[in-house]
Image: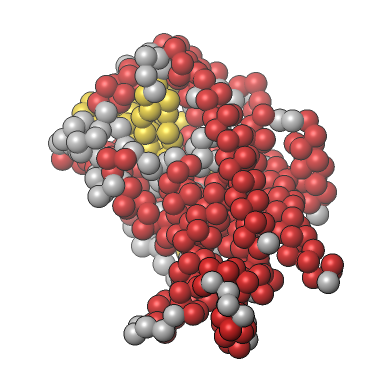
């Protein structure tokens, strides 16, 4: 149990002392996972909206695939991306393996199905009459769509939080495509695993605590954004 | 409103990105004396990373040569496989039988002796199988006879290869509920053995650096069969088009040269009261440990 308390003290010490290595790990964690979430939103929003609003053959198959993708193990995604990026692989010439860019690619692949599935679910639960009303009121399709997004903002932001939470906490893909290189691709999760395998438990706990703190800060800002208008009403 | 806020989020992400890019050049600072950004891939064993040896060696290598090093700390089996596929430029491994076979395949270039330490059989103080002070082969027989729990790496690493070698010398095929396999690195495997009050085989460096957190003791050590020898293997273009033989040669030449050998010999002396590796460059492998 001492380890937990020491870990807490270590976390505070790392944050306050401005330890260069720890801060570069923290910044890289944020950079990789936020970028991956942003890319997943860019791809997932239109895709999820199409699945929710359009009617085309195979739609349910794609929805089922996206729902399955939500449970995709990061280590499998990591393996897939690694094989693609190998020197001998189809994208080997890009020399992306063991770089933060490779980690963003893998994490975006993990987050996109989550965004697609949750966006589709969020927009489908908006009353179908709402769109008819908007059109009857003479709204352009774009304005109608924007109003629809506004109506579904609570579940939409929940989707963004779920996507960020999934990628910031995963270790399998980050380890495999990033390689946990010191000062280059080491993020909080892989640093915690390495500290554990070196027997530095309180340091590992400290990284874990900082990870929780970051996840909390990001989710707090999203939650404030999500709840603001509800409170004002 | 919703869209404006999402845009605000993206703007924030972009800011974080820019901040990240701003700090990136400083992390590659040591390479600035080189004409261009050069980066090689070193595939090595978990023991060199978990013991902290690489943290000591690699910054010095980068300073001396201008090469950045991307280290993949995996089992020796995986390291050799990465070399075979041309995914790594240079290997630092400790699985001699597999290495000789690998070099004979032709994809690898020169293979040179770097250093050694030894393996130790560790277990709980109570030592139910009574292996304390026995030879390694005798110890394996006793563990199997007593059906005392033995934790194996099970990951085709150099340590796992040595363990399998010991079982075959002892003529007892391991199996049954007392023989458990973690499939993980040395640090994790030691931890599992410690929690289960079980026996395991470890390289001395990893055991010594983690001894403080483990309820395990060295029970059998010192016989010549437990020698743990590390070689550096350069990869060539025959393994893959994108292999960088010049980087491989730079690293291999550097690690067998006197300054790096001195670093290896001194590593761990201050912190653990004993060196964790013995530098061996240029020595005759057949005479090690005698």
Residue in the image at 84% along x and 67% along y = A232
Whether residue A195 can be seen here: no
Is residue B65 positioned above or below B49 on the image?
A: above
Left/right placement of residue B19 relative to residue A227 reads left
Spot occupied by residue B74 in the image (x, y as percentages of width and height): 42, 45
Spot occupied by residue B269 in the image (x, y as percentages of width and height): 61, 22
Whether residue A54 can be seen here: yes
Left/right placement of residue B70 relative to residue B4 reads left
The extreme front residue here reads: A138
Question: In terms of depth relative to the viewer, which is nearer, A215 or A37?
Answer: A37
Q: Quadrant of the N terminus of chain B?
A: bottom right
The extreme bottom residue here reads: A129
Spot occupied by residue A60 in the image (x, y as percentages of width and height): 42, 84
Q: How many marks?
A: 0
Q: Quadrant of the C terminus of chain B?
A: top left
Residue in the image at 46% along x and 77% along y = A51
Question: In terms of depth relative to the viewer, which is nearer, A190 or B202?
Answer: A190
Colouring convention used in this rendered image of the protein: secondary structure
Spot occupied by residue B268 in the image (x, y as percentages of width and height): 59, 25
Left/right placement of residue A178 relative to residue A225 reads left
Residue in the image at 44% along x and 80% along y = A54
Residue in the image at 34% along x and 85% along y = A57
């Amino acid at each position: 149990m001492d380890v937990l308390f020491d870990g807490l003290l270590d976390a505070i010490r790392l944050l306050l002392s401005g330890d260069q290595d720890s801060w570069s790990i923290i910044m890289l964690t944020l950079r990789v996972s936020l970028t991956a979430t942003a890319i997943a939103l860019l791809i997932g929003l239109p895709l999820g909206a199409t699945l929710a609003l359009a009617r085309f053959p195979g739609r349910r198959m794609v929805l089922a695939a996206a729902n399955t993708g939500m449970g995709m193990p990061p280590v499998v995604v990591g393996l897939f991306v690694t094989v693609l990026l190998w020197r001998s692989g189809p994208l080997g010439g890009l020399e992306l393996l063991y770089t933060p860019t490779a980690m963003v690619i893998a994490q975006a692949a993990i987050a996109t199905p989550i965004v697609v599935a949750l966006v589709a679910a969020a927009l489908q639960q908006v009353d179908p009459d709402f769109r008819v009303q908007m059109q009857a009121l003479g709204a352009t399709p774009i304005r109608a769509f924007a109003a629809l997004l506004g109506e579904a903002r609570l579940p939409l932001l929940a989707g963004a939080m779920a996507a960020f939470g999934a990628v910031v906490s995963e270790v399998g893909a980050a380890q495999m495509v990033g390689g946990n290189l010191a000062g280059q691709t080491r993020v909080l999760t892989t640093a915690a695993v390495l500290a554990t395998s070196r027997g530095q438990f309180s340091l590992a706990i400290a990284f874990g605590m900082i990870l929780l703190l970051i996840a909390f800060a990001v989710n707090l800002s999203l939650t404030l954004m999500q709840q603001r208008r509800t409170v004002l009403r | 409103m919703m869209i404006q806020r999402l845009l605000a989020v993206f703007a924030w992400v972009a800011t974080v990105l820019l901040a990240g890019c701003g700090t990136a050049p400083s992390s590659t600072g040591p390479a600035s004396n080189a004409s261009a950004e050069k980066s090689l891939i070193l595939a090595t064993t978990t023991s060199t990373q978990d013991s902290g040896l690489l943290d000591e060696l690699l910054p010095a290598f980068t300073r001396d040569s201008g090469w950045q090093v991307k280290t993949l700390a995996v089992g020796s089996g995986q390291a050799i496989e990465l070399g075979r596929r041309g995914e790594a430029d240079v290997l630092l491994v400790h699985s001699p039988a597999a290495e000789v076979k690998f070099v004979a395949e032709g994809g690898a270039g020169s293979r040179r002796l770097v250093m050694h330490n030894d393996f130790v059989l560790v277990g709980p103080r109570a030592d139910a199988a009574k292996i304390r002070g026995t030879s390694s082969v005798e110890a394996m027989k006793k563990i199997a006879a007593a059906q005392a729990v033995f934790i194996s790496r099970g990951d085709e690493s150099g340590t796992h290869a040595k363990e399998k070698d010991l079982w075959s010398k002892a003529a007892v095929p391991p199996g049954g509920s007392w023989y458990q396999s973690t499939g993980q690195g040395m640090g994790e495997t030691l931890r599992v053995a410690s929690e289960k009050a079980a026996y395991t085989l470890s390289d001395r460096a990893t055991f010594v650096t983690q001894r403080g957190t483990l309820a395990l003791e060295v029970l059998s050590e010192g016989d010549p069969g437990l020698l743990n020898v590390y070689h550096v293997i350069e990869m060539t273009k025959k393994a893959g088009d994108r292999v960088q033989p010049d980087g491989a040669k730079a690293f291999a030449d550097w690690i067998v040269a006197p300054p790096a050998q001195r670093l290896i010999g001194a590593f761990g002396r201050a912190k653990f009261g004993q060196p964790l590796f013995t530098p061996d460059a240029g020595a005759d492998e057949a005479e090690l440990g005698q």
